[in-house]
Amino acid sequence: MPDLIRTPVQLYRFLLRCCKLLPSAAMQKHYQHAIRQSYNSHADEDDPERIQMIIQRAISDADWILTKVRAFFGTRENTNRHYLIHI
């Protein structure tokens, strides 16, 4: 897990930036909507351990999706994991 992501807001921003790496506008909109819904549904979460579990799972899921997209659509120059972490 990237050390830079410690809060739900940081996670939200990170995941929205990940969406920009998806190949089509429709895919980007779909995942942006899903991220917003998930963020809103967990907005009242106050258990720090649960928040960290959510952050770890969301990063893992995003990595899995981007890996699958790269495998299916081919590698784009800016879709490597290092680019995602350093944005």
Image (cartoon, rainbow, N blue to C red):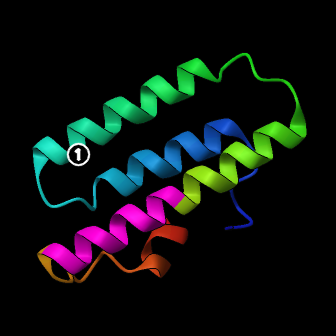
Query: Residue at horizontal 49%, vertical 57%?
Result: 61
Q: In which quadrant is the N terminus drawn?
A: bottom right
* Residue 86 position within the rendered picture, expressed as x and y whole percent measured from the top left: 53, 71
Secondary-structure class at tag 1: helix
State which region is magenta: 61-72
* Residue 74 position within the rendered picture, expressed as x and y whole percent measured from the top left: 15, 82
Query: Residue at horizontal 35%, vertical 74%?
Result: 67
- As drawn, 75 above or below 42: below
Horizontal side, residue 20 vs residue 37: left or right: left
Horizontal side, residue 47 vs residue 51: left or right: right
* Residue 66 position within the rendered picture, expressed as x and y whole percent measured from the top left: 35, 67
- Residue 60 location, quadrant: bottom right
Horizontal side, residue 39 vs residue 62: left or right: right
Q: How many labels, in total?
A: 1
Question: Which residue has dot 1 on it?
Answer: 28
Query: Residue at horizontal 70%, vertical 61%?
Result: 4
* Residue 39 position within the rendered picture, expressed as x and y whole percent measured from the top left: 55, 28
- As drawn, 46 above or below 22: above
